[in-house]
């Protein structure tokens, strides 16, 4: 058994009990060697069921022949092959759009307790680190490609990240393997190709161990990022306290005071960690938006706009809003049968509990100037009532208001405003889920 086979088997030891291994097979050198190694290893070792996955992007004429090439390779090795034809969404970066389409296919095929194996090697890791360094990436970006991560319901693993391209090519030639060459890989107009063909060869000519050193640096950065994540978890524990009075909103939120008490660097660290579950993270210059939100006056309603949503400050918390929460709901809505909950377009669901008040009833939203009659308090401006309860500004335009003709009967969910006379009925609102904001 070759040293490469021994190294691969050791790297894949944590996933030996997986239900299946899927190899992302482009037909290029690295994935061809990976599939061949695994096909050889399963002859002498008990391995999970092995399949190959080829994604055809349809972006260049040469790629039309690659599925047949991959099929011939898989037939010779006795490995089943799945071919996915994907549509690449147009955008500013064709390379990024193709990658996103490819990984959507990989997620579809990788089920729970299954692993997708990709062939990126040490030279790819060095290239990634250099590319991100030139873009001004922080520690997380300089960690480059992780050895493994979640992928859909399963996991993705890069078992060749510690292997050089030269080692893979030597293996391929010793076993008379054939592979395809992507013509676009020679086009130095692409930044990564320029690094691969112009910059890295010049570096390795002067420093022969350059790629190994850069890959080692990426590993150091990954370790440092792990420590930063642990620190973020500790800081998050102090701030991740729901706002008890408005917990029914169901929105992700953090207490502002524990975060503001941290150093500026720790503030950014904990917010990066928390926001990573919701949105693309801001670049360095965009963090001024956080400082403006944090330092705004107590009576202000600051907003920090991010790629996939907004961060609002209200009632001593910062709140994450996305999806329907960024759109004004439509009304009024006639409530023909108040005994049945009514769905509010883009705003969740509303129901009446207890003795249903006589109709006709309809649901509307604030327009300004609303007045509500309260027992023992007379007529009161709705704006003042909302101020008394400290209702966050971003909620006010979404609060369902129950009317009978022109009379405002109730404001959903608010103490003293959501109940009918003597508490015989209650207006309960289940806001729209915030899940559409998760990325």
Image: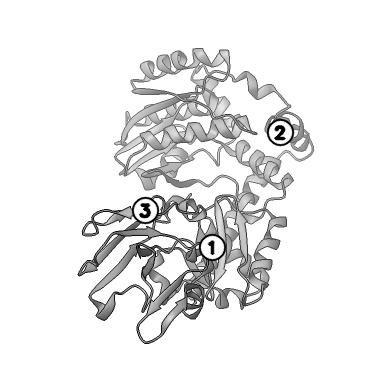
Q: Is residue 159 left or right of residue 257?
A: left
Would you place residue 383 above or below residue 204 in this image? below
Q: Which residue is nearer to you in this view: 306 or 415?
A: 415
Secondary structure of the residue carrying numbered label 2: helix
Disc 3 residue crowd, few under 14, some 14–19, many 20+, Cα 10 Å = some
The Cα atoms of the two marked residues, 2 and 3, are separated by 54 Å
The Cα atoms of the two marked residues, 1 and 2, are separated by 30 Å
Q: Earlier in the sequence, mark 1 or mark 2?
A: 2
Q: Which mark is residue 333?
A: 3
Residue 278 x, y percent position in the rendering: 50, 54
Secondary structure of the residue carrying numbered label 3: strand
- From the image, tell me which residue sits under label 1: 229
Q: Earlier in the sequence, mark 1 or mark 3?
A: 1
The Cα atoms of the two marked residues, 1 and 3, are separated by 46 Å
Q: Disc 2 or disc 3, which is closer to the eye?
A: 3
Q: Residue at x 39, y 56 (%)?
A: 432
* Quarter of image, res 93: top right
- From the image, tell me which residue sits under label 2: 191
């Amino acid at each position: 058994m070759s040293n490469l086979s021994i190294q691969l088997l050791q790297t894949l030891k944590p996933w030996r009990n997986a239900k299946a291994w899927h190899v992302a097979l482009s037909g290029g050198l690295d994935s061809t060697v990976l599939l061949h190694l695994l096909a050889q290893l399963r002859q002498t070792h008990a391995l999970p069921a092995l399949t190959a996955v080829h994604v055809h992007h349809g972006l260049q004429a040469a790629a039309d022949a690659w599925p047949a090439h991959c099929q011939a390779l898989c037939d010779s090795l006795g490995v089943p092959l799945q071919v996915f034809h994907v549509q690449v969404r147009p955008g500013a970066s064709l390379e990024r759009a193709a990658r996103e389409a490819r990984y959507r296919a990989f997620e579809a095929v990788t089920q729970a307790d299954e692993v997708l194996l990709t062939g990126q090697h040490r030279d790819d890791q060095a290239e990634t680190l250099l590319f991100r360094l030139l873009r001004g990436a922080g520690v997380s970006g300089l960690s480059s490609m992780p050895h493994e991560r979640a992928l859909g319901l399963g996991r993705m693993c890069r078992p060749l990240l510690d292997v050089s391209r030269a080692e893979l090519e030597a293996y391929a030639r010793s076993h008379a393997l054939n592979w395809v060459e992507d013509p676009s890989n020679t086009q130095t107009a692409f930044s990564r190709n320029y690094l691969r063909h112009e910059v890295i060869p010049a570096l390795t000519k002067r420093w022969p161990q350059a790629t190994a050193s850069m890959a080692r640096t990426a590993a150091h950065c990954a370790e440092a990022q792990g420590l930063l994540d642990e620190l973020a978890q500790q800081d998050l524990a102090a701030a991740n306290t729901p706002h008890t009075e408005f917990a029914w909103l169901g929105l992700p939120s953090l207490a502002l005071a524990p975060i503001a008490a941290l150093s500026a660097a720790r503030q950014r660290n904990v917010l990066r960690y928390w926001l990573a579950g919701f949105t693309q993270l801001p670049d360095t210059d965009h963090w001024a938006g956080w400082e403006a939100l944090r330092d705004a006056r107590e009576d202000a309603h600051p907003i920090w706009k991010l790629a996939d949503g907004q961060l609002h400050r209200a009632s001593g918390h910062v709140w994450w809003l996305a999806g329907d929460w960024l759109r004004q709901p439509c009304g009024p809505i006639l409530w023909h049968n108040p005994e049945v909950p009514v769905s509010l377009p883009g705003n969740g669901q509303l129901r009446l509990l207890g003795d249903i008040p006589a109709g006709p009833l309809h649901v509307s939203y604030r327009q300004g100037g609303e007045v509500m009659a309260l027992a023992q308090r007379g007529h009161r401006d709705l704006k003042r009532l909302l101020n008394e309860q400290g209702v966050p500004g971003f909620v006010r335009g979404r609060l369902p208001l129950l009317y009978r003709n022109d009379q405002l009967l109730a404001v959903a969910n608010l103490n003293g405003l959501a109940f009918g006379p003597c508490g015989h009925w209650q207006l309960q609102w289940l806001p729209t889920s915030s899940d559409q904001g998760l990325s």
